[in-house]
Amino acid sequence: MADSRSIDPVVVDHVAGVARAAREASRRLALLSRAEKDAALEALADALDAATPQVLAGNAQDLERGRERGLPDAMLDRLRLDETRVAAVADALRDLARLPDPVGEVVRGSTLANGLQIRQVRVPMGVVGMIYEARPNVTVDAAGIALKSGNAVVLRGGSAAEASNRALVDTLRRGLAQQGLPQDAICLLDEGGRDAARALMTARGLVDVVIPRGGADLICTVVEESTVPVIETGVGNCHVYVDARADLDKALAIAVNAKTHRPSVCNAAESLLVHRSVAEEFLPKALAELDAAGVRLHGDPTVVELAGRAGVECVPATDDDYAREYLALEMSARVVDDLDQALEHVRRFGSQHTEAIVTEDRAAARRWVAEVDAAAVMVNASTRFTDGGEFGFGAEIGISTQKLHARGPMGLPELTTTKWVVEGDGQVRG
């Protein structure tokens, strides 16, 4: 466990001060009506549009520094902003404004025999801490979801996106002030290095929940060291399994899309499993198309042989290859004897994120859905659909692979907790 006594006390005091200010702001946010929150979201979106040149200037600094440091292409892609991406995150705020407000929703309720009326009502968490890597869009998504759900947010982004995040948060805070709302509803920890992140995850009593979003090392560190409750987002070692009774045209489109549409994100497919009965017909076409898209392939002996027949380079795969989240144009592939072997492979190497089957066999699809342990299970669809926006949630704050409180894409309801409201007329317990 991380111990605040081993962290620079100056950083601890700074983070505590930021968290207290966020706590004070959260009390105001919790009382806002939906109309007030939606108007604020629209104003923040307009502020982002107007500040696009400043945001892109900050992002250019980060990209230049990242290239000098030798950041891999996948990381640079996550870091990169352009006018289209800034417009997209602004539009995500407008989409949030159109979504129902979860605060005040009655989850369940009843009237007891003694006349007591009880109901379970959604309420904000309070102060949400976000620790994430070089994804400046997360800065806006997290701020917007927190605002709509009545929470204040304390953001600790990766140093690679320092200038981008500062420009974004400065813009959002100005937008809040223009709406007469407390600026400290959105706070950025941009000093203190790793000690700032450690202070945030040990600020128990000041921060209500911490959500890590990034690579396996970051998530593992937060889960293991945090004394604040954590909603764990996980890595995405996602699979596409092509069954014996797959429509091979569908399978080809799904496998290529799942890998190449945006390889640097967690819902991109990292492994391709193919039933032996269709391997000779399917794999040469699939491997050739993946190769043409620039995908580096790792395969078992059968895959390597079929790749050779198709004139495609494929290196022998190891267990480490099957276990990797590549986040790049790279993929492992394996031929399996049956559905049972495919399920066993997913159980061994999967990360409980998203697993897809392509099949026209309804019994096989039912088994896949029932037996795969993952936050999202796809039947005849790309893994790329595991996304809050695609699910209709608006901007998401992450994809949870844990089993408590939230699982899968986390939208507005997942940033709330509940309280029980009990109304009586003088009843006492005998």
Image (tube, rainbow, N blue to C red):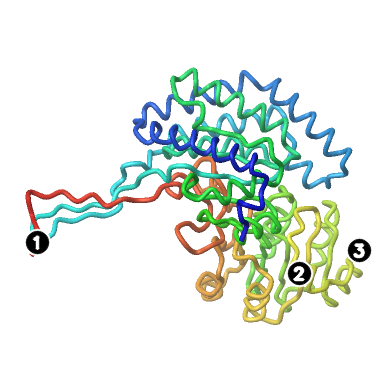
Residue 11 versus residue 196: which sits nearer the camera?
Answer: 11
N-term mark: 2 or 1: 1
| Left or right of 171 in this view: 322 | right
Q: Are marks 2 and 1 in contact (CB under 8 Å)?
A: no
| Left or right of 70 in this view: 385 | left
**Disc 2 designates what residue?**
322
Which part of the image, by quadrant, shows the N terminus?
bottom right
Residue 186 versus residue 301: which sits nearer the camera?
Answer: 186
Quadrant of residue 346 in the image?
Answer: bottom right
Compared to residue 82, the image places residue 253 above or below, namely: below
* Secondary element at image label 3: loop
Mark nearest the camera among 1 and 3 is 1
N-term mark: 1 or 3: 1
The numbered disc on residue 2 is: none
**Amino acid beneath label 1:** Ala
Instruction: Give residue 235's position: percent from left, percent from top.
Output: 66, 58
**Amino acid beneath label 2:** Tyr
Mark nearest the camera among 2 and 1 is 1
**Disc 3 designates what residue?**
313
| Distance from the alpha carbon under mark 3 to that under mark 2 | 17 Å
N-term mark: 3 or 2: 3
Residue located at (67% from left, 35% from top): 190
| Left or right of 310 in this view: 38 | left
**Disc 1 designates what residue?**
113
